[in-house]
Image: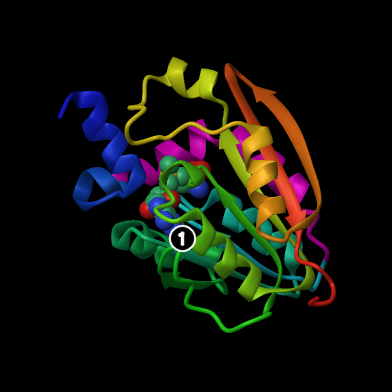
Amino acid sequence: MKPAGLLSGQLRHPRGWIGALLGPVMNRSNAGLNRLALEQSRIEPGNQVLEIGFGGGALLEMLLASAMPGIAAGVELSRVLLRSGQMRRGLRGAVLREGAIESLPFSDAVFDRVATVNTIYFWSDPARGLREVERVLKPGGRFTIGFHTEADLRRTGVSKAVFRPIDGFSVETLLADHGFVSISSAVGRAADREFICVSGHRERTTP
Ligand SMILES: C[S@@+](CC[C@H](N)C(=O)[O-])C[C@H]1O[C@@H](n2cnc3c(N)ncnc32)[C@H](O)[C@@H]1O
């Protein structure tokens, strides 16, 4: 595997000491997208919020602060980042679990908001992941997916085989095909990065 492939593999699933170093790097390089995802999540005080693939924890920390006195939960595939999250001062009070979008370790209809940033490139089974998000959302709950554009990923030099690029229209279609409603997108730029957040809601009533 080429060096770009090795780094991309670590960004997909951080492991060992290199993985532990990547948390702060992700927080810095994804700060603009995390801010847009926070804004697009439209958190209200008292909300129950979940972030899937919280990485270095910067967005989860902001979600937790915005949702208070509600709760924030985070799921992470990487054990090393899960441990860092458990030690992060700003995440005291957050519920942190090991897991993946394809199998969320939570009961049905518990969250008002679910967010995930920079994970869609890696989903092994999008249909299964979206069913899981819908299951844990309360009726009417909002789901926000943040990701960098294909041009941005190309500029950063990550491996296309690992970071499978996707565009805003395809993400909107994916959400609509899986029963989400009131879908909208927001595009952002910060420093030299370019990103999109697509949001949709779980229907209020089941058909
Ligand atoms: C590129 S990092 C992004 C981290 C953080 N969200 C950010 O944008 O800075 C991708 C993260 O998602 C996690 N991840 C990868 N595949 C996942 C999956 N199928 N479900 C949940 N998390 C996943 C990885 O462990 C990693 O921490």
Pick whichever, 163 or 7, lies toward us.
163
Pick whichever, 80 or 200, lies toward us.
200
Is 124 placed left or right of 110 in the picture?
A: left
Q: Is residue 156 above or below residue 132?
A: above
**Location of mark 1 (residue):** 88
Q: Quadrant of the C terminus?
A: bottom right
Q: Residue at x 55, y 69 (%)?
A: 132
The secondary element bearing badge 1 is classed as loop
Is 174 placed left or right of 9 in the picture?
A: right
The CB of the residue at mark 1 lies under 8 Å from ligand 1:
no
Q: Residue at x 63, y 37 (%)?
A: 170
Q: Is residue 122 above or below residue 63?
A: above
Which percent across, then down, holds residue 194? 61, 23
Dot 1 alpha-carbon crowd within 10 angstroms: few under 14, some 14 to 19, many 20 or more: some
Q: Quadrant of the N terminus?
A: top left
Q: Which residues are magenta?
A: 21-44
Residue 140 in which image quadrant: bottom right
Pick whichever, 22 or 153, lies toward us.
153
The amino acid at mark 1 is Arg
Q: Is residue 36 above or below residue 114?
A: above
